[in-house]
Structures are given as structure tokens and as C-alpha cells.
Amino acid sequence: MSRCGLIWCAFVCALTASRRTGTGYVDNATLRSIFENLGYGEITDDDLDVLVQTADGDKDGRISLEDFRGMLANGKQ
């Protein structure tokens, strides 16, 4: 599986878990954990800010599955 595929799977798993708790969004602790577990090393608060700003398609300060799908679709263009 490609690195993008791994990130996608990890992100979907995180969102699935967040939907069970009723939020529907990935929190920063989960986002940090995803990237650290994929081998990106320590993720700082500044790194998280960049990730959220990049992936937050509707600019509400949170990342939903729809935001992430939009980011992936824009990357394919």
C-alpha cells in the first residue's frame, strides 16, 4: 500500500472513532498520533497548525472526512 493509502486508512480509522464519540472530526492529539505512527517523527504544534490549515477545506478550524477527501481530490488535479 502506498504512503498516501496508509495515511488515508489511518485518517478514516480516526474519523470513524471520532464519529462514535459524536464529534465527526479528528482532534489534534489523534492527528499527531497518526503522523508519528506513520514514521514522520515528532509532530510539533506548529506542524499541526499547518496540517489543519492545509486540510481544513471549509475553514472551520477542524478536519472532517469531507475536508480530507477534498484535499486528496485537489491533490490529484
Image (spheres, rainbow, N blue to C red):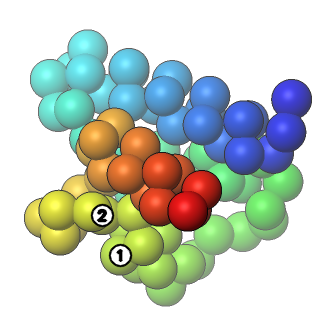
| Quadrant of the image containing the C terminus | bottom right
Q: Is residue 61 left or right of residue 9?
A: left
Q: Which element is circle 1 on? A: helix
| Quadrant of the image containing the N terminus | top right
Image height check: is 50 above or below 29? below
Which residue is under mark 1? 53
Residue 18 sits in which quadrant? top left
Residue 18, numbered label: none
**Residue 34: x percent and y percent?**
62, 45
Name the residue located 34 percent from the left edge and 38 percent from the top edge: 65
Crowding at dot 2, Cα within 10 Å, few <14 / some 14-19 / many 20+, comes out as many
Residue 3 sits in which quadrant? top right
Q: Which element is circle 2 on? A: loop
**Residue 16: x percent and y percent?**
38, 20
**Residue 47: x percent and y percent?**
55, 78
Amino acid type of the residue that numbered disc 2 sits on in the rendered structure:
Asp
Name the residue located 84 percent from the left edge and 54 percent from the top edge: 39
Residue most extreme to the bottom: 46
Q: Is residue 63 left or right of residue 76?
A: left
Residue most extreme to the top: 20
- Asked whether 9 or 74 is in front, the reply is 74
Amino acid type of the residue that numbered disc 1 sits on in the rendered structure:
Gln
**Residue 15: x percent and y percent?**
38, 30
Report, in whole angstroms, how far the alpha carbon at label 1 lies from the one at label 2. 5 Å
The answer to the question of whether label 1 and label 2 lie on touching residues, with beta carbons closer than 8 A, is yes
Name the residue located 71 percent from the left edge and 54 percent from the top edge: 36
Image height check: is 48 above or below 39? below
Which residue is under mark 2? 56
Report how many numbered discs are placed on residues in the image: 2
Name the residue located 48 percent from the left edge and 51 percent from the top edge: 73
Q: Is residue 27 visible?
A: no
Image height check: is 42 above or below 50? above
